[in-house]
Image: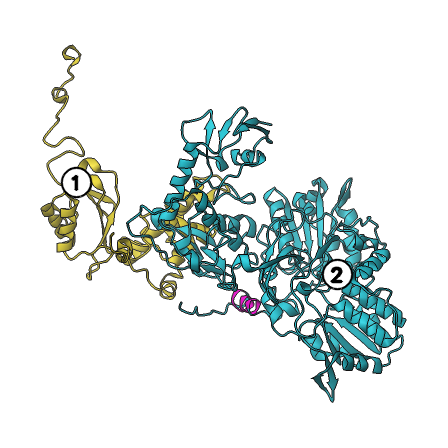
Amino acid sequence: MPKLTVDGIEVEVPAGATVLQACEAAGKEIPRFCYHERLSIAGNCRMCLVEVKPGPPKPQASCALPAADGQEIQTMSPMVKKAREGVMEFLLINHPLDCPICDQGGECDLQDQSVAYGRGQSRFHENKRAVTEKYMGPIVKTVMTRCIQCTRCVRFAEEVAGVEEIGAIGRGENMQITSYLEKAITSELSGNVVDLCPVGALTSKPYAFEARPWELKKTPAIDVMDAVGTNIRLDSRGRQVLRALPRINDDVNEEWASDKTRHAVDGLVRSRLDKPFVRKNGRLVAASWDEAFAAIRAANAGASAAAIAGDLVDAETMFAAKALVRAMGSTMLEGRQTGLAYDVSSLSAVNFNTTIAGIETADAILILGSNVRWEAPLVNTRIRKAVKRGARVWAIGPEVDLTYKVTWLGNDLSLLGDLPKELVEAFGKAQRPALIVGGAALKPEGAQAASLGLIDTLGLIRDGWNGYNVLHFSAARMAGLMLGYAQAGGIADIVAQAPRLVFFLAADEVDFSRFEQSFKVYVGHHGDAGAAAADVVLPGAAYTEKSGTWVNLEGRVQRGERAVFAPGDAREDWTIFRALADVLGLTLGFDTFEQLRAAMAREVPALGQLGLADIAWQRPSLSGPAPTGPIGAAIKDFYLTNAICRASPTMQRCSAEILHGETFLEAAE
Amino acid sequence: MLSRGVHPLMAEAAHIPDEAETRARWGGFAWTAENADRAKVVIARYPAGRQHSAILPLLDLAQRQVGAETQTQGWLPVPVIEYVAAQLDMPYIRAFEVATFYTMFNLAPVGRYHVQVCGTTPCMLRGSDDVLDACYKKGLKKGHTTPDGLFTLTEVECLGACANAPMVQINDDNYEDLTFDSTTALLEALARGETPKPGPQIARQTSCPEGGPTSLAEMVDANVDYRSRW
């Protein structure tokens, strides 16, 4: 534990800390461009110079200098200031003076730091260097003349995203950052390089020239594109969300977000349901709320009602729908819209028990039927971290590139009964062995029981360690299971009971042909498959347009706030069910959002408390035939998994270009 | 203020062939039997798991093989870089970075003789402009190959032979102590297919002083104890 002084302030930092970290511990701000907490140290921008005693009588780069006992650091001495001003002057030599047309303006590290360390005028009269733009795909826009070669993007691609496709070519003044042969970066995390870029060299292509940061309203929210529950900040102006950025949460997403999280938001202003529709003579006709409610009352369902929740809905919506269905006298609720019917008698057995942050510390991992990279990109980065620390990974399922070394055992569930000796031995020796069961692996009969059986075979549960993980994909799943959105036989149970009235809560992945006899009410925000099949469409709010509670795949209860209002006549979903209850002459037990939350917390206490829900381990006793046969893929197209991203032009383009290899001509600027 | 135009280095950059064309021509690149053995030897120099270190010698070997196939000094088409990277289990971009970093790797085709004229200060002071003029007179142009495919001219930075400035590197040999005339003679000899003697083009042994030793001259023939004279 070295003790040192920074500007006369004594600090003690952990062994291995750098001088820069020690300065931060002392509350001193050190300017930097290349240094980033979550990336390796490069030490090439030279902005973080400080004066260190004892040491050579010259400023030193604090980011790459280990803190040592007895050091005296000066961060504000004349030498330091002069040195940083010199570095800044060199950086600005080749940096264009185009802040007024640069998207980074207002949130630019170089701009901010040049206020502190820049000279008023330029002394440089030679030609400035110009660099041609590099194509990096549909997400990242480049203006490479602005690049200061900090190599954060290169390090991110290599270390975090695991796709070594960005590099620095050439040397000296001719060094240029580029993607390999200027092809689109094939990473689902490529948008993060935009945040990492300290200047305007890499900016967001879909957001280009949309807004200035100071005119945006910033709202904390939770992402619903997958079950990770990425903490996001929604930047909106007027009635439109212009971008989604990650918030730092070391337990969940660190400070990353997938491209889908960031860029599906442009789907929120397309294909929206902004007024109710009622099916008349086979066609959906725009109607008023009264007409729509009257049509539902006319269905005269009595107690024969059901609710099927989609992947994106919040707990409040599901609770309101549940309250209505219950008031009608029914308990038919289901959230696994594609027909999964795994056992949910113990919530802990369908939970990600190691936690997202915990999987980093696992030393042996078996992935069963999950393309983690697509189903939960930010869990995949954690597994990648574990692999870098020395964990070994095996997988059963369709072979995919997970960005780290995986021993693929094959795609046959019968392997579960006949695991290779090497794997069993490695798990036996492991301190923290983990199993990750994907949604696709829960589908075949007996697979869930067999996966639970691995707890014994592989010794997944130890003192203080539970390595049995189920990886959900749907943001609504865990909250839905807590609220009882699960029938023993899955959606088939509801089909068998042939309810007269079915509410579809933004559920678009259902096989609607099985509900031909039912009166279908779609409560959702996008005109997708669900609305097309419905008899009555009630326009609801998307995740950006309502405050809501979501539970991520590790059982973490998180809340997002409303950033903008829903378009047109659309309403927040819970108010729709509350109003419909009045029309049907029923009482739900709440009149305000606060009352709803209180009622929900009474019923499911975990949903009333933010943070990791206390889900005690309880092993269900399941039995079934030994599973055989291949495991399918849970997701066919990463970029088009729900109604919002299907409506998003950015996601459609990503899908076409990155997954299907189509090429697009760039418009000449 | 100077006029702002195209950066001089950009105008001199050699033309890199179209990617589709390159892939069609070089997509099937593979080591010759002899080079495959050499590659194995090179890789074996490094510990297991550190085979990335072999990238420099292997790229050089590949460039020479391309040269042998095209009767030139060789270059590194993208598929060839990828072939080498794949052999070392290395991401393409990492190999590409190496290939673009070192000026000894040619990213565009060159002629049979790659004339690299040093233009750094010592050579410039000793007359590298004359050397370049001689090249220009023979029809060579920076960044271009002569129409007969014989010469490619590149101006390079210091090649470390300052004692013999000015100098050029042609293929693997240095030609030193050049003048306008000796450079012209050198190029003409090469064009005739001769192999001029590398090294100083004047009466001088390697980088020893011109016209014989200027210090410790008495020691040329026998050992002399100078100490009494100090």
| Residue bounds of the magenta highlight | A650-658
For the colour yellow, the matching chain is B
Q: Nearer the viewer, residue B69 or A311?
A: A311
Horizontal and vertical percent for residue A558? 72, 54
Q: In which quarter of the image is the C terminus of chain A?
A: bottom left
Q: Name the residue under label 1.
A: B125
| In this rendering, position of residue A5 left or right of residue A173 | right
The vertical placement of A505 against B226, above or below, is: below
Question: For residue A499, which quarter of the picture?
Answer: bottom right
Q: Which mark is residue A471?
A: none
Q: Which of A299 and B58 is in front in this view?
A: A299
Q: What element carries label 2?
A: helix
Under mark 2, the amino acid is Arg
The vertical placement of A217 against A55, above or below, is: below
Q: Which residue is drawn at 36% across and 66% down?
A: B21
Q: What element carries label 1?
A: helix
Report crowding for label 1: few under 14, some 14 to 19, many 20 or more residues within 10 A (C-alpha): few
Q: Residue furthest top?
A: B228
For the colour cyan, the matching chain is A
**How far is the residue under mark 1 from the one under mark 2?**
76 Å
Q: Is residue A652 covered in magenta?
A: yes
Q: Name the residue under label 2.
A: A477
